[in-house]
Amino acid sequence: MKPLQKHACPASYTGVIALAGNPNVGKSTVFNALTGLHQHTGNWPGKTVAVAVGSFSIEKERYKLVDLPGTYSLLPHSQEEEIARDYILSGQADAVVAVCDATCLERNLILVLHLLSVTDRVVVCLNLMDEAKRKGIGVDTEKLSHLLGVPVVGVTARRKRTLAPLLTAIRTVSSRAKGDPVPEVGLAETEEAAAALVSQAEEIAEAATSFRSADYARRDRRLDRILTGRPWGYIIMTALLVFLLWLTIKGANVPSRILSDTLFKVGDALAALLVRWQTPAWLRGALIDGVYTVLAWVVSVMLPPMAIFFPLFTLLEDIGYMPRIAFNLDRPFHRCSACGKQALTMAMGFGCNAAGVTGCRIIDSPREKLLAILTNSFVPCNGRFPILLALITMFFVTGSALGSAVMLTGFLLLGIGATFLATKLLSATVLRGEASSFTLELPPYRKPQLGQILVRSVLDRTLFVLGRAAAVAAPAGLVLWILANCPIADKNVLQLCAEALEPLGRLMGMDGVILLAFILGWPANETVIPIMLMIYLSQGRLSDGASAAQIRQILLENGWDWSTALSTALFTILHWPCSTTLLTIHRETKSVKWTLLAAALPTVFGGGICIAMHLVLSAAGL
Amino acid sequence: MTEMKERIRLHELPPGKSACIEAMNGRPGIKRRLIDVGFTPGAAIRCLYRSVAGDPTAYWIRGTVIALRAEDAAGITVRTAEEGSE
């Protein structure tokens, strides 16, 4: 399943092809259809940002395919548009495939004309021909090709068969000898030049397109009026969140248990095997009780919910609901002097905060981008869902998936509320400034491509995130086991640390062990609960199978009650971002100062809330 | 019908009404961005609906839907079209 690396040597390519296009025109679909599984870098979060690279063949000749971020023109307004512009102007590509949405050719042609002003090695790929046909829009590709002076092919990227003419055109254009005269139009830098291209696009589109009905987008408008209008806009958004979480919880329940049972049985078998081979007890302990147990926990707790949540999430992206969320939430973000697109990066954060931080490149203004980056970890990611879920099912709602989903939604809404608060706070202090301009396209609703959703979300998201968590969990398990089994004055290192943290933990309504688990769980939050249990059990050994009831028993024996669980849940949502996220923040901001602020901000929020709650509860005698 | 036409700023165009863009003013940054997505003088535009919170507003332009905040739409002068569809 791993991406093929054997074409890594550039010398083996016949040519390099770049995919360019407006956002939301199905560029990723064309990319996936051409490359299949031959992708060197995953698409996460490539649907929105970053460059994905893959390869494909035309009659035994291999081509490298570069999927550029979506852009409207060659005068960049955002960082990701800059990436696209720079790549095209660098002349690295032997041909640029301009992917266009056949259902809104006019606007798409603007970019095509921009491209043609700097290179003539362009193939126009009219995607979504089936949708255009359904909407009664006809495009005369021959006429269009004649008017533009470059090959134009109509495709329906979700049906691979339709791509054959595209391959032929790519081959023709890319094999043309370099050094052909390049049009001397030059980049449209002035507003006048840009406006002239728009008029030209209008004329060409008018000549090449025919509409059977002027009202082809009626269904979309009706849907929009419900999904983004009063009174349903916010209600549907919240209900969808509950539904998504309910499906995830309900669906993950049984597979999680089966996985856990199986993995722990395998663990026992492995332990027995090691005994038979007469390996020393310390090695057995380190490998099985340390590495294997933590790994098994992370896999069984994380894999099923992710394998359900990510495809559902991708489905919403695919249908076109995500921009509607940004449309609905722009007003509150605007009030915080931020950008509505922060709603999108926040939604990405629910999947993975590191991905959400990278996704902030879609925000044009540097100040607003920074706001989005610094507050991204205020919403809990997939690695933190399981902690919240475990706490909910053990201490608050037992046996009802819907009840758990509602409570989990409550926690998520709390995270969203904290996001607004922190954004407002930042833009009133260190990131002061006016809200910049905001343009957001609401693309047509699309029929989802279920097969592709499943493959891509499992390959690019689920396995990616799980792999990263596992890579951290395995060594973490080893280190923990060693710490838990190295006695200093008849106590182990972990217990000593936990004792040192006890006063602070108590003040926050938790205890030293919980706080220590959060600190040790820094590389991967998924490991927080297993770490806690290891320290409580002090032997560094998780009981087999570790069912919710058993874990609850262990926690109760160690002085937990509902308020401990609540504090822990709040701190789960609001504490320092995981190491991967912080590294990503540093990469994106190139600043230690902002990275430290990104770590401090949620920690102060969470710590403050926990302490306040503890003081109130103590005063109330609860 | 021509006397029905009036010159207003885009954010004053009520949902359901169509207009023709007359002039692009506004800050340079946003102006160029708007031109790139198709907002140029002469273009037909229609106000579709406002977001659940009352702002931003979705506009139909050149076969696509673009949402703008009131303060950004205020930089665009339009001439309203005579009463047409809807």
Image (cartoon, rainbow, N blue to C red):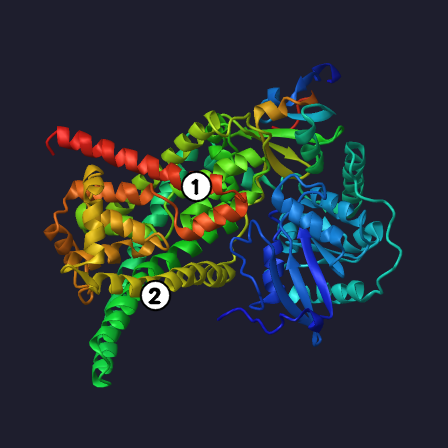
* Residue A564 in view here: yes
Distance of label 2 from label 1 (alpha carbons): 27 Å
- Dot 2: chain letter: A
The amino acid sitting under disc 1 is: Leu
The residue at 80%/40% (across/down) is A200
Between residue B71 and residue A466, name the one nearer to us: A466
Q: Secondary structure at mark 1?
A: helix
Give above or below for A269 relative to A338. Answer: below
Q: Please state the horizontal and vertical placement of residue A374, each as a whole percent of the image.
A: 46, 39
Q: Of the numbered discs in the image, which one, if any, rests on residue A474?
A: 2
Nearer to me, B77 or A602: A602
> Do the residues indicated by labels 2 and 1 lie within the same chain of the protein?
yes
Location of the C terminus of chain A by quadrant is: top left
List the residue tagged with mark 1. A596
Q: In the rendered view, would you say A589 is above or below A422?
A: below
Look at 39% across and 54% down and name the residue there: A309
Going from N to C along the chain, the mark reached first, 2 or 1, is 2
